[in-house]
Image (spheres, rainbow, N blue to C red):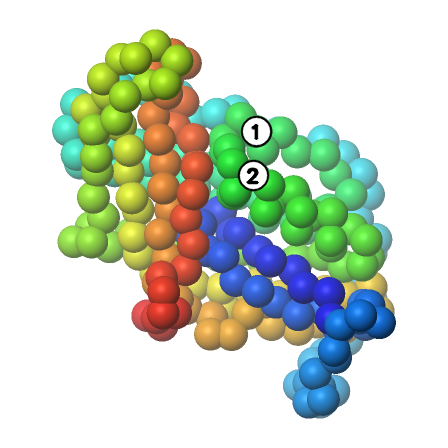
Amino acid sequence: MKKLTTIAAGCGILATIALAGCSPASETTPTDTPSTSAATSTETATPTAEAITADPYVTEAPSSAEEAISFASTADATFDDLVWALYANPSASADLGALAAGDPLDKALENAATLKDLGAHIEGDSSFEVDRSATYTQDTVDQGSGQSVPFGLVNLKGCADYSRVSIVRASGEIEPFTDPQRVRVTSVLVYSPSDGRWVLTGGGTDEPVTTC
């Protein structure tokens, strides 16, 4: 069964969601299928291609851990908004590279491509509540300049809520985005002193998966 591996911005969650109706012969389809009574159907308009853009979140270098966490939280939420907009219209183009790099960027683009291939899209968005008691910062060294950056890396930890998010299939069938809908996650953001950007570079669900 073809999978949609999501990295939801704003919390960096890595969750695996099976999308039915796209099972390669080389893979085994689960014998238990979701009840049709649990899903609802509606007629939805086909999203049209457009360009989705967002400016990178640019700040001065953080002068304290609290300031770094505040800056990183805003940058994370900016990426979150952009990715949900792309998942709502996966035929669109989006400049995610201004806000993320590495695995988060690759997964988001892969997810959008999968949704587009399936003729599906996402409705709704998530929320993320930062756990300040578990969130922490680290000093970093900028790879380009060799400059030391106090508080330049932030591990945002908290609770992601996906209760308002649904998958809309090509048929119009609507299903919950994921279960459980509230899980503890981590987002890793790094500050680049050369251009003042905060960039999402990693993250995922806490292991083992923990509800919140």
Residue 64, quarter of the rendered image: top left
Q: Which residue is mark 1?
A: 97
Residue 160 percent location from the top left of the image: 40, 60
- Residue at 66%, 70% (x, y): give it: 18
- Residue at 67%, 47% (x, y): give it: 110
Question: Left or right: 212 with respect to 114?
Answer: left
Question: Left or right: 24 with respect to 180?
Answer: right
- Residue at 56%, 39% (x, y): give it: 105
Name the quadrant of the N terminus: bottom right
Question: Left or right: 59 with respect to 16?
Answer: left
Q: Which residue is mark 2?
A: 105
Tell me: residue 189, above or below residue 38: above
Q: Would you call the spot at circle 1 few (<14 residues within 10 Å), some (14-19), or many (20 or more)?
A: some
Question: SS of the residue at dot 1?
Answer: helix
Residue 35 percent location from the top left of the image: 70, 89
Tell me: residue 165, above or below residue 20: above
Amino acid type for the residue under numbered disc 1: Gly
Residues marked 1 and 2 touching at CB (< 8 Å): yes
- Residue at 24%, 21% (x, y): give it: 149
Name the quadrant of the C terminus: bottom left
Q: Would you call the spot at circle 2 few (<14 residues within 10 Å), some (14-19), or many (20 or more)?
A: many
Amino acid type for the residue under numbered disc 2: Leu
